[in-house]
Image (tube, grey):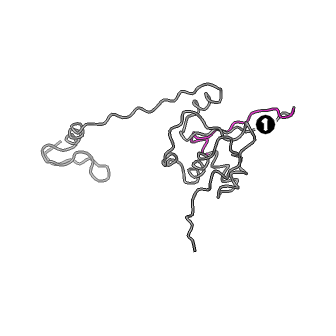
Amino acid sequence: MAVTQPSAAPRPSAHPLANPGYGKRSAPDQTPRTGRDFVHLPTREASIATYIDRLADESDLSIKTLAKHLPYGQCALSTALKHLSAAGHLRRVRRPVTVDGCPRWVWHTFFSRTAHDDTWWNALLAGETPVTERPVAAAARSTAYSLLARLGRIDAVGGGVRGTGGGGRRVVRAGRG
């Protein structure tokens, strides 16, 4: 009997595409894909975000379609998509369109594996090019800095560590202030 390897994530290639002009739209200025893109999210949201990230653009991201392909129900998916939106990875925008002379409201869904704030998303949705400020890398502290910092915490006379004792009380030794 052959043993199959179970996979935690369903195959994104089996996911249907939306009608032309609808579905998932990838946001610009994303960081490259890594295995740690969504570790800051709860497990369910991270799983759904990873699945959506693997989907092709114009994939159908309706809650009913996602519920058919993921091990979560419609209510759980709706809540998770709201959390992804609050975390800055997803924006769902309702826009009016005219199809065959009939006005309709449709959802346009934008997804980014890089979390962005509301200002960035508003600029993107307004048709502007959002400006992403890359975090400045913290300067590495030298060994000398670390040694001096440790020396500042050591009592020169007794060799003990200055600061608080157990329970947050200040330790005061007899004969020293």
The answer to if 37 sits in the magenta stretch is: no
Q: Nearer the viewer, residue 142 or 99?
A: 99
Asked whether, in this view, residue 76 is left or right of residue 164, the answer is: right
Q: Nearer the viewer, residue 157 or 51?
A: 51
Q: Position of residue 26 (x, y in %)?
A: 61, 38
The answer to if 99 sits in the magenta stretch is: yes
For the N terminus, the image quarter is bottom right
Outermost residue to the right? 101
Image position of 132 with respect to 61: above or below: above
Residue at 70% over, 55% down = 68
To which residue does mark 1 refer? 105
Outermost residue to the top? 128
Image position of 119 with respect to 112: above or below: above
Residue segment shown in magenta: 83-100
Badge 1 amino acid: Trp
Asked whether, in this view, residue 140 is left or right of residue 136, the answer is: left
